[in-house]
Image (cartoon, coloured by chain):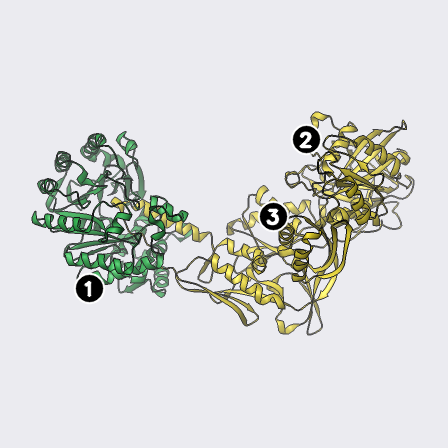
Chain colours: A green, B yellow
Amino acid sequence: MGMPLGLYLSVPFCRTKCTYCNFASDVFSRAVFDRYLDRVCADIHTTPESAGQMGARLERDADSVYLGGGTPTILDSHQLERLFVTVRQNFRLVPETEITVECAPGTLTPAVVETLLRCGVNRVSLGVQSFVDREAASVGRLHKRETVLDDIVRLRGAGISNINVDLIAGLPHQTAESWKESLESVIALGVPHVSVYMLEVDEDSRLGRELIAGGTKYHAHFVPDEELTAELYERACEQLNCAGITQYEISNFARGGFESRHNLKYWTREPYVGFGVDAHSMLKSASEEFAAVRFATADALEAYVAGASVQRTEVSRQAALEETFFLGLRLTRGVDLEQVRSEFGTGVVTALGAVLVDLASFGLIDWEGDWVRLTSRGRLVSNEVFERFLASGADAVMR
Amino acid sequence: MDAAYIRNFAIIAHIDHGKSTLADRLLELTGSLTAREMQAQVLDAMDLERERGITIKAHAVRMAYPAHDGKIYQLNLIDTPGHVDFSYEVSRSLASCEGALLVVDASQGVEAQTLANAYLAINHRLEIIPVINKIDLPSADIPRVKEMIEGAVGLDASDACLISAKTGQGVPDVLEVIVRRIPPPKGSPQRHLQALIFDSWFDPYRGVVVLARVFEGTLKKGQKIRLWSNGRVFQVETIGVLTPKPVEIEELVAGEVGFLIANIKNVADTKIGDTITDDERPAIEPLPGFEEIKPMVFAGLYTVDAHEHTQLREALEKLRLNDSSFFFEPESSVALGFGFRCGFLGLLHMEIIQERLEREYNLELITTAPGVRYKITLTDGSLIEVDNPSRWPDQSEIAKVEEPVILAVILTNEEFVGGILKLVEEKRGKQKSFEYVSGSRVMLQYELPLNEIVLDFYDRLKSVSRGYASLDYHLAGYWESPMVKLDILVAGDPVDALSLIVHRDFAYERGRALVSKMRELIPRQMFEVAIQAAVGAKIISRETVAAIRKNVLAKCYGGDITRKRKLLEKQKEGKRRMKRIGRVDIPQEAFLAVLKVGENSS
């Protein structure tokens, strides 16, 4: 019997598109929702066939369901229920399955909360980003600080206390003082899980493009510099850890026992299947030729609904080894070399010795016994560390 | 052919003054090419030549011209390279002629290149015919241009030909003037053979093709010839002329110009300026003026991708088949790996070679800063020549350094003189003359260290004169100068490819400029990186590249690991394209920065 699956359902609809968003979400007319759900539900029904075509092994058991977006709560109760019913018809959700829904503050009316409870949702992730109204407004969030506080009261009243709050360091207008306000607010709320992201500057978001172009649209000229953003992140790590919300991954903090089961699957390379637009899956291989297979649906809504084919990537043994490091090291506990040896062979760890020694000499990793983990500086420059585990040509340590 | 009916001539002009257009027009008028066969500028056959509007290789075209006196004349047009880098080749082409057309743009007037080549022609006692071109332009100022020809070149311009090569206006007269004013060649077909090689190239099907002017005797098919400088003997297989299509003939007699093919494998055997004589009946002495060509400018050439080193070697070998004036030998650099030290006739020559390597052979190159060859007297009295900073002796072993010096001729308008004087002073120039050649036109003659020219002199001159200055130069000897080696250290390690030889008084300024440029170009690393400039053990400048503060991917949208991997791979590939020195990754541009270092100091 293999590991139970994580199931991801993508709902790429929003009331407005935030300026920092580099995901496939967007504002679509409600007329599209049902057509989209038809397609998603059809895909859920045919998962075993699809997995077979991908050359992957598929379990029927799942222990996490994650409804992400987008803003899933933009769907009406009938639509939400339809999704969960379809999932339960096709997978067996084990007892105490973690069922998360991402919510935009202000969308959690009593009716929506009621629907979520009926669907079995037991965890809510709130895209707060900032408790300072001006900062949230500057990137297009529609809520105010008070909205968030009300939502949390309502959720707890309904019995959902497993709540995550997302924060972003590096938003326009943010300062050390305003960030302190957001951190203190989230600590005072007593939520058991916090995610802290740093603003990503790339060509895939409007704000990112404006920053690259050096313009002033989207408050881009009020975005803190790299130095300050890094400091804000460090401040968050310190304060959350002090408050007992312990860092367990580069961007994730939780009180003991509240770590997100779903997100951990990504970093520990446990199998998951995604449904909907730009949804990603990873399943173990059905054959010995390769270790696993990753596949992704189209990233444009029209193409997805029209039935565009999935992108399939085989994960070779070498690639799986690399992933073990560049995903596993994201976790505070790090990577267990003993486990790497047992999975990939002793020689592999020996071959990586030089890289590990080098990284340790730069103070980027701690290497104690069989465990390797990022230092706090290593976390901030983790891409530089991860890159070292990618083999290029002659560097490959295994076939 | 009776020599009385032969005219050998060259065309001298500044770039863009219309040399090639006039040549095309002459070919057309003499029926050598039909209008349909005309491709603009037939003689500049190489792509690079057409694009840049320059002539790199010499050519010789024979035309038949029925003159007004009722006789048919054989006109041999010897097209010469115009650039200063090739002044020796120009001098050999001119030596093959009895006359020259001096083409001057009616609105631009005399430029430095016109002048340098006109002086060369005067020294060769050529009959020079001034031709004022582009008279159809609204900005044409014929009286002023005549005044400049008389003032600057010292030629009588009163009966200059007035033409428009573009429209053809006045061109037929040029042919008549050639016949009337240029003297026929001397020499006798019966004497011992003396022919001058003024160009040669390698043809993959026929071997080396030699262009030659016969001064004495007769060159025949089947004849055994001997090359004077190396004594090598070859049997002539083919004799011919270019019309411009190659046409085979039986012989070339004294006074004539043409090509020969003699199963010669190596272009280095057929040195420009060498004398061809008969192996059985050799001449008593060679023709005058032969010199071994010596490279003047040196630089290291490396491939960006170390795996392409072999391809670079093969490409250099192929290029050298056709250009014996360029030299290369293997060298290795700690920073750049395996490459070649190359010697060039000048900067243009270097650029051409680089461009051909990149274009024709698809190589991506890194070129180190161009430098010159110094004569160094060591404290033990011995004399060495050094063109590579990495071979520069320790300062304590040096008794005396001499650097090559050029005599530069700069022509400009008086409004730009101030800026130019400042520039040449900054470049350690010594004034030789300053004179008005006409109205507001000024001619400056300066002695300048070649070392100061090779870095960025052209660009600087262009910018201070807004393009209204022309430059020509030739080697004028050596100066003793306090030259030192300037090293750039990255994280404590000297980067050999960035070392420069500079005048002691400039070391501080150059070092500072280079260090600050490097600070901009070297990306942040995992640790703080010190960039220093040093002369010997003394650090003269220092800047620091701060360590990377953050490089982290936070969000994981729905488990998209493929995107994360792609970003990491892209990052890794970016580093692979950099050169690693010690623990520091240095991008390619940093090595080019050294070429531009002077710009900051102005």
Instruction: Give the camera-side residue of B278 and B28.
Output: B28
Residue A11 located left or right of residue B453: left
- Which quadrant of the view contains residue A345? bottom left
Residue B308 located left or right of residue B36: left
Residues at marks 3 and 2 touching, judged by CB atoms closer than 8 Å: no
Identify the mark at residue B354; answer none if there is no mark: 3
Residue B131 located left or right of residue A257: right
**Is B462 drawn above or below residue B400 in the view shown?**
above
Q: Residue A196 placed where, x, y %?
A: 25, 54
Mark 2 chain? B
Mark 1 chain? A
Helix, strand or loop for disc 1: helix
Residue that badge 2 annotates: B39
Residue that badge 1 annotates: A242
Q: Specify the amino acid type for callout 3.
A: Gln
Helix, strand or loop for disc 3: helix
